[in-house]
Amino acid sequence: MLSELVQQLTVAWQPIMDLHAGTPWGYEALIRGPAGSMYEPAEALAELARREDSEKEFEETCRRLAFQAAAKELPRSAVLCLRADPRFAGLALAPPDLDWPAERTVIEISEGSPLFSEPEELQSRLGAWRTLGYRIAFAGFGSGFAGPAALLAARPDIVKIDQLLVRDIDRDPWRQEMVSAIVRAAADLGAVVVAEGINAVAELNEVVARKITLGQGTLLGMHVCGSQIPDATGGWQHSRQGSPDILASELPSTGAAYVVDRTRRIVAWNEDAVTMTGYRSEAVVGTKCWLSGLDHSDMSGSRLCFRACPLVKAMQTGQPQTGVVSLRTAGGARKWVVTHARPITNESGEIVGAVETLVRTPKPQQQAGAAVAPEQRPPRESLREKFE
C-alpha cells in the first residue's frame, strides 16, 4: 500500500515569517499524499509506514523529496526546515548530488521521538547532524510532556512553540505566562523562538509583544506549492527612483513590497507588488501613496491613509508596524493582507522613508480596532549570525 502511495507524494511549503521584516525567513517542507484521500496528511502516511514496518524507507523518501523540491523551488537565501526522526540519523539527510547548503537547513524533531527517553543517545545523534552544519529545531514545544529535560536533551537552536499555546493567547493569561516562560528559557539557551499557528490579528500582536521574532500560521501565509514562492530577485530593477539614501538601503528580496520617501511618494515598487495588486510600477512610482489607488482599510472598512497609516506611524515612531488591512487592487476589488511597515534610515540614522511588505491572508475573523501595532525590533544580526 505505502509503496503505491510513495509515487504520488508531493511537497507543500509553509512559510516561516520574519515578524519584523514581514518577509519569509524560511519554509517548512510538508509531505502530502494523494489530494483528497485519507492519506493526504503526513501523519496518516507515517502511521501507515509504522504498520507496514517501513518507517526507515518512508523517512528516507521524505528527506529526498524535501531536498529535491527545495533545490528546485526555494530561493537560495531561504532556510529549509524539515522534520526528521533522530532514530534514523545514520541515513543521509540530503541526496549527495544536490547542492543545498547545510547552514541553510534546520532539522525539526518533535517531543514524540522515543529517543527522548534516552537523552545521551539523542544528544549523540543530533550531534552527528550538527557536525555536518545542520541546525536543530524542537517542534511543537509545550504540546505535551516536553519541559526543561527535553530542552536539555535536544539542546535546540530553535524552539517552535506549539499552536495550542498560541491559540487565543491574547485572551488567556495562562498561555501568556507559559509563552513568556518559554521565550525566557530559549533566550538563556541562545535559541531562536518561532510561534506556530498564528491565525488571528490579536494573536499576532500578542506574539510580537512577547518579543518573538519568527512565526507561522494561516494569517501569515497558507501552504503553497513551489510555483507560488516568489523568487529572490525582488524585481526592483524596474521601479527604482528616488533618493540615493533610500535606494541604497536593504530592501526585501522576496514578497510584494514598495518604498515611500518622507512625503509618502512611492519611489520603488517591485514585481511581486505588481502581481499582488495589479498596479504596474509605471502607474504608481512617483505618485503619493494615498493617490495611487492603493488605499488601506481596517476591518471596519475605515480608510487608514490619513488617520492610521502604517507607513506614517513607522516614520514617526522609528518602529516597525504590523497589522492586517484590506487593500484596493487595480481592478477595484479588495484583498486582505498582513502589512509590515518599517522605517528606512540613512548612514546618519535619520529616517528618510519607509518600506511596506504585503502578505496575502484570509479575511480575519476579528473585531475592528488595533489594525496596526508597533513592534520593538531586535538587532537583525541575532538571526543572521545563526543562519549565515
Image: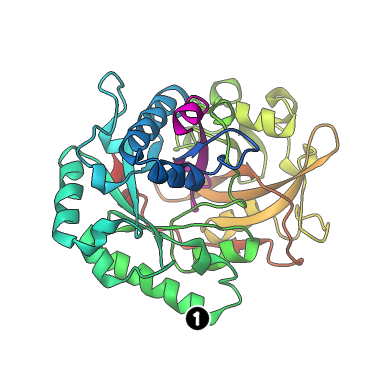
Which amino acid does the dot numbered 1 rest on? Trp
In the foreground, 187 or 59: 59
The image quadrant that residue 110 belongs to is bottom left
Image quadrant where one finds the C terminus: top left
Query: Which residue does the numbered mark 1 point to in the structure image?
Result: 174
Residue 203 drawn above or below residue 309: below
Residue 154: give x, y in percent of width and height. 24, 58
Is residue 8 on the magenta stretch? yes
Residue 377 drawn above or below residue 281: below
Tell me if 332 is positioned left or right of 129 in this view: right
Residue 66: give x, y in percent of width and height. 41, 32
- Answer yes or no: is residue 385 visible: no
Tell me if 86 is positioned left or right of 363 in this view: left
Residue 26: give x, y in percent of width and height. 43, 41
State the extent of the magenta-drawn residues as a range: 1-28
Is residue 147 on the magenta stretch? no
- Label 1 SS: helix
